[in-house]
Structure formats: structure tokens, C-alpha cells
Amino acid sequence: MSEIIYGIHAVQALLKRAPQLFREVYILNKRDDQRFKLLIKQLEQANIMIQLVNRKWLDGQVEGAVHQGIIALVQQQEPQFQEQDLPALLVPHPHHAAPLLLVLDGITDSHNLGACLRCADAAGVHAVIIPRNRSAHLNATAKKVASGAAETIPLIRVTNLVRTLRLLQEYHVWIIGTALEAVHNLYQKKLNLTRPIALVMGAEGKGMRRLTKEHCDELISIPMAGSVSSLNVSVAVGICLFEAVRQRQKIACL
């Protein structure tokens, strides 16, 4: 089976990782900037068929999404990581940082999933965990927004999220959930993000599901000074993950 991906970063990332998956690439016939010339050269060197098409045709393939003038037809990829692969990512290693995991509960929008993957990749997250049901698919939209992160970061779909949280706790991973009603906030000194942690983020507005929240070891909030009551989930993910990055870099420098 085939699927499409679109956007310069998504195409470049897959071309670098698995050029054999490409079947055909469609490029806007009027785009002639240096960035595109380089990408076309790379595609030609990989012996990938290229077709020049007009903007109307490209728009029609992605229902008006921002394709940046490039769409690729690729072989559908099998998931690289399965639920049973998770323990291997949690084994302590003297030369690796403590596990930093991101758990997304109830994120059903593909744009948000892609943006969260991009944040996770930038922060050095070891894996992103999502429930198999009631979650966004890793489709062309998510991959485009992820800007290449979808091809690099382990995304693990699990059948039972609560069971997975219990497994993480068995491996001494501290489960930190985000909730508006939390007593403590992200920036209080007692919050230690340098140990093995899994950050759990729920959908904007609804938050985490009840059972997910009950299995967190600790709940935190992001302090809000303005009139809005919540942030887009990908923004919240970035804020929390890079506080963990800040703490870990500070420890590394001591």
C-alpha cells in the first residue's frame, strides 16, 4: 500500500532515512529556488521518479493543506516500534541521560500530534507514547507539521495506557501529569525533572482522562498570568519539556 507525504522537511527526512520507500515525487512546475534545486538533485541521485505538476493538482491531492510545492507517493511504512519495545528504551545506561518520555492522552488532532512530535524531537525525548484508540493518526498532515521528527522519534501506540503507566513505574519512571487544578506548578524548586520521567499531557480543554490522572505520581500546572485559561497542547508540551532540558543541562554542567 502507498501513502502520501508532503512538505519539504518531511520529504527530506524520509529521503535521508529510507529513500527506497519513495515511488514518485510531484513538484510544483514553477518553483525554481535554490532549496528546491538541491532537493531535486538529491532525488535524482537516488533514482526517484519526479513529475512536474501545477499548483491546482497539488492542492487537490492534499485538500488545500500547505504542501510547499512538493508531494511524494511512498510505500506505507510499518511502525518501527511496538508496545513490547518499550522496556528496552527504559534500561539504565551509564552514558545515556535518564529516560525522558512524552505521553499524549486524547490528542486527536493531527496538527497537534505533529507539533508535539517536533517539540519532543527538539527536546531529546526518548519516545512518545499514545493510546491506540482515541488518538490522532500519524498521517501526512502530522508528518508535515512534525518537520522530519515523525521519521526519527520513536512513536509507540499502546493498547492500554494505564497498564503502560504501571509498567513505567515498575522501571522507576516518575509519572508527571499536567492539570489545571494541580497544587504545584512547573517552576517550583521541588520539582525534579532530571530523574527518569514520563510527562503526561491531555487534550486542550478536557485534559487527561480520569484513570490516566489517577495513575500519575505527581500533578503540575503551568502558571498562567493572562486572561486565557489554557494553552495549545503543543505549546504546553514545549514549555514543560524544555524545563526538563534546562534542569538536565544544569546538572550536566556541575
Image (cartoon, helix red, strand yellow):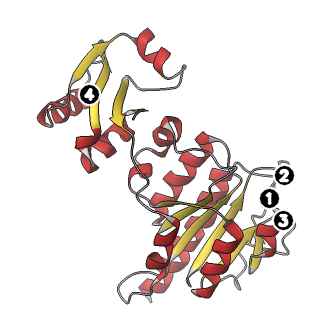
User: Label 3 is placed on what type of residue?
Assistant: Arg
* Alpha carbon separation for disc pair 3 and 2: 20 Å
Q: Residue at x 78, y 64 (%)?
A: 223
* Alpha carbon separation for disc pair 1 and 4: 42 Å
Q: Where is mark 1, residue-wise?
A: 224
Of circles 2 and 1, the one toward us is 2
Residue 128: x percent and y percent? 54, 62
Residue 16: x percent and y percent? 25, 47
Residue 97: x percent and y percent? 44, 80
Say which label, 4 or 3, has the lower sequence index: 4
User: Label 4 is placed on what type of residue?
Assistant: Phe
Q: Residue at x 30, y 41 (%)?
A: 12
- Give the quadrant of the N terminus: top left
Q: Locate residue 157 relative to residue 135 in the image: left or right.
A: left
Q: Where is mark 4, residue-wise?
A: 36
User: Label 2 is placed on what type of residue?
Assistant: Ser
Q: Secondary structure at mark 2?
A: loop
Of circles 1 and 3, the one toward us is 3
Foreground of the two, 90 or 233: 90
Q: Residue at x 31, y 21 (%)?
A: 26
Q: Secondary structure at mark 3?
A: helix
Q: Secondary structure at mark 1?
A: loop
User: Label 1 is placed on what type of residue?
Assistant: Met
Foreground of the two, 32 or 60: 60
* Alpha carbon separation for disc pair 4 and 3: 48 Å
Say which label, 4 or 2, has the lower sequence index: 4
Does residue 68 lie above or below 242 as drawn? above
Tell me the tag on residue 210: 3
